[in-house]
Image: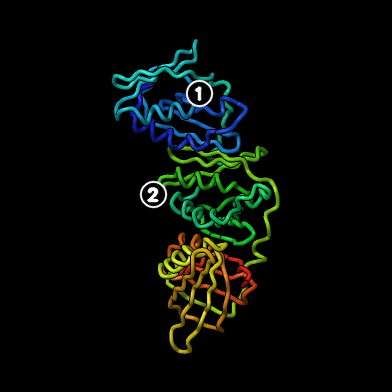
């Protein structure tokens, strides 16, 4: 293999794939990145057997070849090189990659590319086309609600359902539910329902460039995998096997108190309350107080024996009876952080039943949050 590539292109490609490298594995090759020529471009790939990421970068190919090299060594080396042309040369007999840039010459011992796990080759003609910027926003609005608990792997995933021309993402950790819908440009012939690891979708949102590009999603038959193909990158993830909770049954169908708040004002108040609340289990009490014909007010309070107390008032339009209810303020902040509308409706019934947040003017998103015990 003889390849010449710009340092910034190489560094960017390594930045995309290196997050899929396995930090702790009994297979040494999983700590490596595959460097291979591929139809006139340089392909970089990394996998931990659950998640795999590939990136294609422009390069001048003098001679085809492939090798895997230790990820950390290669990433650190390339990031330290000057912004210049990098020349890669492989000695197949010793499996050594020589990296030359300016006056820098480094030899890196590698492992034969044959030992690297094969990545699936998706049939792009059979895939589902998704708008990149819309899908990134969908991911960001649901993935934070997925669980981090290894004991419940199904809740670590995001349920993706596609029927006709609608795609839905849903995530829950048992304390909150995030659901986002969107329309597809092209209807699908066959309905899809899969559970994709939340981490894989977070990585997809990270590597996907902004803009009106499309990505193709493909689910190879019988492999338990999903493949997302972008213009210059590809992400492969194992699917999660199991039954996702019936989240639709938990979303309240009506509310007694309907409160409309400014998203920036509500978010700022939550951030202020969180400074105190994080020392006391993140609990904030919200006193929703209608004022007759006048705009109402919500008193958001937090207290901690070690730190002190916090009281913030937020103006709101309130329709319905007064209510004192408690929430995990971290959960409130995380959902307010991903809303794109200026106002949000908080719909409540009682202090021990789920509350709903719906952005005003966006019917495609709903977030359900369980209240905390009013101690």
Quadrant of the image occupied by residue 331: bottom right
Q: Residue furthest bottom?
A: 293
The percent position of residue 84, horizontal first and vertical second, equals: 29, 27
The percent position of residue 177, horizontal first and vertical second, equals: 59, 61
Tell me which residue sits at (59%, 28%) in the image.
117
Helix, strand or loop under label 2? loop
Residue nearest the viewer, comparing 173 with 121? 173
Quadrant of the image occupied by residue 5: top left
Badge 2 crowding class, 10 Å Cα cut-off, few under 14, some 14 to 19, many 20 or more, is few
Question: Which residue is labeled 1 in the image?
Answer: 68
Q: Quadrant of the N terminus?
A: top left
Q: Residue furthest right?
A: 243
Establish if 196 lies above or below 360: above
- Tell me: 303 left or right of 315: right
Q: Residue furthest front?
A: 306
The percent position of residue 310, horizontal first and vertical second, equals: 47, 70
Quadrant of the image occupied by residue 41: top left
The tag on residue 297 is: none
The tag on residue 211 is: 2
- Tell me: 297 left or right of 247: left
Q: Is residue 190 visible?
A: no
* Distance in Å between CA atoms under marks 2 and 1: 32 Å
Residue nearest the viewer, comparing 20 with 323? 323
Establish if 222 lies above or below 188: above
Q: Considering only order in the chain, which callout, 1 or 2, is on the residue closer to the N terminus? A: 1
- Tell me: 212 left or right of 92: left
Please say if the residues under marks 2 and 1 sit with CB atoms less than 8 Å apart: no
Of the residues tagged 2 and 1, which is closer to the observer? Answer: 1
Q: Is residue 110 visible?
A: yes
The percent position of residue 226, horizontal first and vertical second, equals: 59, 42
Q: Quadrant of the C terminus?
A: bottom right
Tell me which residue sits at (53%, 20%) in the image.
111
């Amino acid at each position: 293999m003889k390849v010449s590539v710009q340092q910034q292109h190489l560094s960017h490609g390594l930045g995309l794939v290196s997050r899929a490298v396995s930090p702790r594995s009994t297979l040494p090759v999983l700590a490596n990145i595959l460097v291979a020529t591929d139809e006139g471009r340089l392909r970089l790939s990394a996998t931990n057997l659950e998640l795999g990421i590939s990136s294609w970068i422009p390069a001048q190919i003098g001679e085809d070849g492939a090798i895997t090299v230790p990820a950390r060594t290669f990433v650190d080396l390339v990031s330290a090189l000057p912004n210049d042309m990098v020349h890669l040369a492989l000695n197949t007999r010793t499996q050594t990659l020589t990296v030359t840039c300016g006056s820098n010459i480094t030899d890196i011992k590698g492992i034969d590319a044959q030992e690297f796990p094969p990545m699936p080759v998706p049939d792009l003609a059979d895939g589902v086309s998704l708008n990149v910027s819309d899908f990134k926003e969908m991911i960001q609005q649901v993935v934070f609600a997925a669980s981090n608990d290894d004991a419940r792997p199904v809740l670590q995933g995001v349920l993706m359902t596609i029927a006709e021309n609608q795609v839905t993402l849903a995530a829950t950790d048992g304390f909150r539910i995030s659901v986002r819908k969107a329309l597809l440009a092209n209807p699908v012939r066959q309905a899809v329902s899969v559970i994709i690891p939340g981490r894989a979708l977070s990585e997809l949102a990270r590597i996907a460039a902004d803009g009106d590009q499309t990505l193709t999603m493909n689910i190879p038959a019988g492999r338990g995998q999903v493949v997302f193909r972008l213009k210059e990158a590809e992400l492969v993830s194992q699917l999660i096997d199991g039954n996702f909770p019936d989240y639709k049954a938990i979303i309240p169908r009506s509310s007694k108190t309907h409160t409309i708040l400014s998203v920036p004002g509500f978010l700022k108040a939550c951030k202020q309350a969180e400074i105190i609340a994080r020392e006391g289990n993140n609990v904030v009490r919200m006193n929703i107080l209608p004022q007759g014909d006048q705009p109402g007010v919500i008193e958001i309070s937090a207290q901690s024996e070690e730190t002190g107390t916090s009281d913030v008032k937020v103006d709101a339009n309130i329709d319905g009876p007064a209510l004192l209810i408690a929430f995990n303020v971290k959960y409130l902040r995380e959902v307010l952080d991903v809303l794109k509308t200026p106002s949000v409706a908080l719909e409540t019934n009682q202090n021990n039943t789920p509350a709903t947040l719906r952005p005003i003017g966006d019917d495609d998103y709903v977030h359900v949050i369980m209240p905390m015990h009013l101690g």
